[in-house]
Amino acid sequence: MNDKIIITGICGSLREGSYTRMALNIALMGAKDAGAKINLIDLRKYDLPLMDGRRDEETFPEDVFRLRDEVQKSDGIILGTPEYHGGYSGVLKNALDLMGFDEFQGKMIGLLGVAGGSMGAANSLNSLQTVGRNLRAWVVPFQVSIASAFEEFDKEGNLKNRVLEQRVKQLGEKVTRFAYLHKIGKSEEFLNAWQVAPVNPGGERRSKEGK
Ligand SMILES: Cc1cc2nc3c(=O)[nH]c(=O)nc-3n(C[C@H](O)[C@H](O)[C@H](O)COP(=O)(O)O)c2cc1C
């Protein structure tokens, strides 16, 4: 396979000095180390309207199509969000609502949540799993929540805790590897095996044993 895997991070915080953006950059470094071409979507640089469900989509500003195009070209997407009132940010939701199946179907999604509180961003991550499935994407079975974020980063945007840093990098690496497996068709092999597998293999065995 000659094509590089493209992994794009979307940052759900617009804040100057955002910890979510810092964490996403680290996750993208993990993706780069795994061989991916990386791209960070900083939504401060996009002029996006609120999604209003309009049908005449050609009236959307150019940046909506720029956003869609960048995500469409990606093999995997890492969604980074701050925890806001027990959920993920409205900024991220609006960006996702301006996109859809064309951008996400069949893609790998990695989830990264950042919270000010000690409970972390588990609520955001749980909600985003549901959103990912509704976009018909594959949400990878590894996610990262950073609690008490204001204590975790140095001024240069590095994580002070090496174990946590490795975990964030692993997120990027895993999204890249799953995207690679998907791209080379291994997921089709799995799905074909799934199609021909017995409907209730455990049940069959039990009934034979019961005879
Ligand atoms: C509107 C708002 C709601 C927040 N709600 C929560 C919350 O429910 N739980 C929590 O742990 N932190 C909460 N925080 C703190 C943020 O998660 C924290 O400041 C985080 O670092 C923001 O991400 P950022 O640094 O990428 O901007 C909230 C912050 C804001 C602005």
Image (cartoon, rainbow, N blue to C red):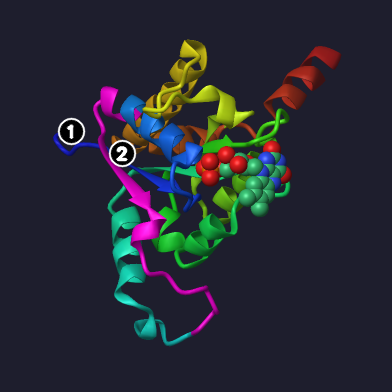
Name the residue carrying label 1. 1
Residue type for callout 2: Lys
- Decide: few, some or many residues near mark 1? Use Cα within 10 Å; few <14, some 14-19, many ≥20: few
Q: Mark 2: which secondary structure?
A: helix
Residue 74 placed where, x, y %?
A: 31, 48
Q: Residues within 10 Å of mark 2 (few under 14, many from 20)?
A: some
In the displayed structure, does residue 190 sit left or right of residue 58?
A: right
Is residue 72 magenta-colored?
A: no
State the extent of the magenta-drawn residues as a range: 31-54
- In the picture shown, does residue 67 fall above or below 187? below
Front residue of 33 and 184: 33
Query: Eyeballing the image, is 84 above or below 153?
Result: below
Q: In the image, what residue occupies the spot 51% across and 18% down? A: 164
Cα distance between the residues tagged 2 and 1: 9 Å
Which residue lies at the image location 33% right of the left edge and 37% below the top edge? 185
Any magenta on residue 49?
Answer: yes
Which kind of residue does numbered mark 1 sit on? Met
**Mark 2 — residue?**
183
Q: Residue at x 26, y 32 (%)?
A: 36
Which residue occupies the foreground of this view, 113 or 118?
A: 118
| Residue 99: % across, % down | 45, 64
